[in-house]
Image (tube, grey):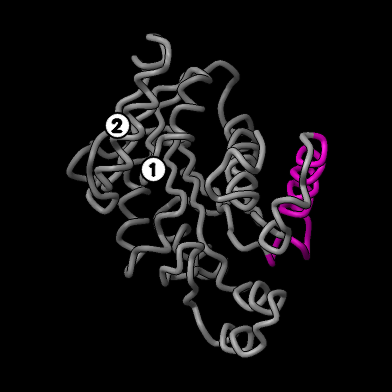
């Protein structure tokens, strides 16, 4: 993997690689080795995480409302070996309608990465995700960090934007679209309320948003940088200023 191979550059590479590491860590801590898990990936996008988990032997359902993205996910799936294709299905639908598509308690792992920033009222969505969890199931959320919104504009020299960010829970994504941000304290309460209390959390993209893609030139540099992000994302106080938060809750 190189930064030039990802449309989102270094931040996108860091997000995908670090969330994969963290998710694998939480899965290994909760389930026996070799157990074939039932995974629901809400907001699956192009299916990158879904396909990675299917290659690891799990049964994966990806739910995505964007027709273009679901088409891309299905095209990627079609290029996989038959054994992997048989473990994955992609469904076009809204993440707020999980109850329409699936029975409660039907999944061991539920992912919802990068969806909550685009949802005006996240609590019903999160409650629906919780209902999908089987006993002992793992819920993985990736959200924008409202407690760190001033960091990026300040590093970019936007002093006014940084000051305004202290009093806001809104930000702009890398495409310029305004999105919501969430606070760790509030989501901790939400997860407890749906019966999947917080078990672990990580910061994601602690440094990456302030680093030029060409500053990480070689594969060795990238590997070292990913290890740096990994360490920072699980170490206080650094993890608290990650652009994103990865929260893992569990039922029972």
User: Which residue is at the far top?
Assistant: 82
Kindly identify which residue carries mark 1: 45
Residue at coordinates 77% horizontally, 54% vertically from top-left? 232
Q: Where is residue 192 in the image (x, y as percent from the top left)?
A: 47, 58
Q: How crowded is mark 2: few (under 14 residues within 10 Å), some or many (20 or more)?
A: many
Q: Position of residue 149 (x, y in %)?
A: 60, 74
Q: Where is residue 52 in the image (x, y as percent from the top left)?
A: 51, 27
Please tell me whether residue 18 is drawn above or below residue 56 in the rendered image: below
Residue at coordinates 37% horizontally, 63% vertically from top-left? 118
Kindly indicate the quadrant of the structure image that contains residue 33: top right
SS of the residue at dot 1? Answer: loop
Distance of mark 1 from mark 2, alpha carbons? 10 Å
Q: Which mark is residue 90?
A: 2
- Overall secondary structure of the magenta stretch? helix
16 sits left or right of 123 in the view: right
* Magenta segment boundaries in residue numbering: 220-241
Q: Which circle's residue, 1 or 2, is located before the other in the chain?
A: 1
Q: How crowded is mark 1: few (under 14 residues within 10 Å), some or many (20 or more)?
A: many
Q: Does the magenta stretch include residue 52?
A: no
Please tell me whether residue 2 is drawn above or below residue 249 in the rendered image: above
SS of the residue at dot 2? Answer: strand
């Amino acid at each position: 993997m190189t930064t030039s191979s990802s449309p989102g550059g270094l931040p996108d590479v860091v997000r995908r690689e670090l969330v994969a590491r963290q998710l694998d860590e939480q899965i290994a801590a909760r389930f026996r080795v070799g157990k074939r898990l039932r995974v629901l990936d809400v907001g699956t996008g192009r299916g990158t995480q879904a396909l990675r988990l299917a290659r690891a032997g799990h049964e994966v359902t990806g739910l995505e409302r964007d027709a273009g993205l679901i088409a891309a996910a299905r095209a990627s799936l079609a290029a996989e070996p038959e054994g992997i294709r048989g473990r994955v299905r992609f469904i076009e639908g809204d993440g707020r309608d999980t109850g329409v598509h699936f029975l409660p308690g039907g999944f061991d792992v539920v992912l919802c990465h990068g969806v909550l920033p685009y949802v005006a009222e996240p609590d019903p969505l999160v409650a629906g995700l919780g209902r999908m969890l089987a006993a002992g199931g793992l819920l993985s959320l990736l959200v924008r960090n409202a407690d760190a919104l001033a960091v990026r504009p300040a590093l970019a020299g936007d002093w006014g934007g940084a000051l305004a960010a202290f009093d806001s829970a809104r930000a702009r994504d890398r495409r310029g679209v305004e999105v919501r941000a969430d606070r760790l304290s509030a989501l901790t309460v939400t997860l407890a309320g749906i019966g999947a209390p917080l078990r672990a959390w990580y910061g994601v993209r602690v440094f990456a948003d302030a680093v030029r893609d060409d500053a990480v030139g070689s594969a060795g540099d990238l590997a070292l940088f990913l290890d740096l992000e990994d360490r920072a994302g699980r170490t206080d106080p650094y993890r608290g200023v990650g652009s994103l938060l990865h929260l893992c809750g569990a039922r029972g």
